[in-house]
Image (tube, rainbow, N blue to C red):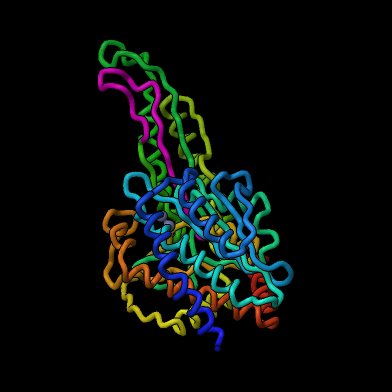
Amino acid sequence: MSELAAIQQVITEEKAKLVEMARAIYSNPEVGGQEFFAVDLITKYLEDKGFKVWRGIGGLKTAFMASYGDEGFHVGYCSEYDALPEIGHGCGHNLIGIAGVAAGVALAATLDGKPGRVSIIGTPNEEDEGGKVVLVKTGVFDDVDAAMMFHPGCSTNFHVESLACRDYRFIFHGRGVHASTEPWEGRNALDGVIQTFNGINALRQHLKDDVRIHGIVSEGGLAPNIIPERAAADFIIRARDSEYLTEVVEKVVACARGAATATGTSLEVTESGFPYDAMVSNGVMADLFEESLKESGYDLESPYNEGLGSIDMGNVSRVTPSIHPVVAITEQWVPGHTHEFSRLCDTEEVYNIMLTVGQAMALTGHKILENRDLQKKILKEFASATRQKL
Ligand SMILES: [Zn+2]
Ligand SMILES: [Zn+2]
């Protein structure tokens, strides 16, 4: 039997159980850090399949590592399973989670005593704080030689890039007084926020094209007849290059400081969340996955082109060769993070695509484990790409 047929056979045998798990995760959406149901379901299944499981890795309660095999090149599949508040699985992480599981189980079945290790790494809280950032920092990926996952989307892109990303909160403290009887005694914190937005809008003219700065007023005062004593704005700042992003962040913070000076208020700056690095896709692995996906029978046309976001897989890609291909699950444009996209992630057709992708990721892993030259090429490209970009 060919390796593709062997992998296919495992996926076919496990199909009912895999789809049932993806459906169960869909029907029980859990936000980041609270994915106890999903982790319990997946890890019990993997233990049944002979995987050794470590729960709560990296200090994260809903992270796990499940491994099969010991010695040799170590292939890791990242599983996500967190949902969005209110919307549920509007980012399709139920599909990501189970595609990773399918790939791991199918690859493990083909190891058959040969050297090599396959792991499924449960990476929680992608939507909010970025669980992979913590797992990278705590060394979970240190002994993984190649990491991969897929993300469902409206277009297919094998060599996915992403923007480095930082989150900031600016809190302005002023003096709250009656807005009509003695406004001259007040210091308007909301003006600090408004001037920050104006400063940033003036700054945009001088920034490179790939920079994204988007913010909201998260606190804007209590009532129109009180000069706002406290006001706050939350910003997300992104750029392709992490070093340039640091420069842009300094300029954005300077806008807030200038606004505080101009309005006579004081400013508190906090970085919220973890910094996301830009994704460095491993070209050798991305090509292998593309070839494997075609061999697995995937043929959806996707004319739409998506722009760049930020993903915590970016941080993984700095410590281990990685890919994060986006695979279209529809030929229409359906905006992500919506109820409409969520409905799409619970259909029979899409569960079939999830399994096809799982099969392709297993095949990619198999090709890597079988071929030492490919392993060397992957590691060589990783070394030169991270040297250049870090
Ligand atoms: Zn998302
Ligand atoms: Zn997502």
Q: Is residue 201 visible?
A: no
As displayed, is residue 128 above or below residue 173?
below
Residue 301 percent across, percent down from the top left: 33, 79
Magenta extent:
218-241
The quarter of the picture where the N terminus appears is bottom right
Identify the residue at horizontal 27%, vertical 70% (top origin).
Answer: 332
As displayed, is residue 22 above or below residue 348?
above
Quadrant observed for ligand 1 in the rendered image: bottom left
Residue 100 percent across, percent down from the top left: 51, 65
Q: In this view, which residue lies farthest toward the bottom?
A: 1
The quarter of the picture where the C terminus appears is bottom right
Query: Taking 368 as reference, is 219 left or right?
Result: left
Identify the residue at horizontal 54%, vertical 47% (top origin).
Answer: 62
Q: Is residue 110 visible?
A: yes
- Judge whether residue 215 is colored magenta: no
Residue 386 percent across, percent down from the top left: 65, 65
Q: Which residue is at the front of the view, 269 or 29?
A: 29
Quadrant of the rendered image containing residue 25: bottom left
Q: Which residue is at the front of the view, 240 or 255?
A: 240
As displayed, is residue 279 above or below residue 371?
above
Identify the residue at horizontal 56%, vertical 61% (top origin).
Answer: 48
- Judge whether residue 220 is colored magenta: yes
Identify the residue at horizontal 51%, vertical 30% (top origin).
Answer: 268
Quadrant of the rendered image containing residue 229: top left
Query: Taking 106 as reference, is 178 left or right?
Result: left
Residue 292 percent across, percent down from the top left: 50, 81
Q: In this view, which residue lies farthest toward the top?
A: 181
As displayed, is residue 105 above or below residue 368?
above
Q: Which residue is at the front of the view, 219 or 288?
A: 288
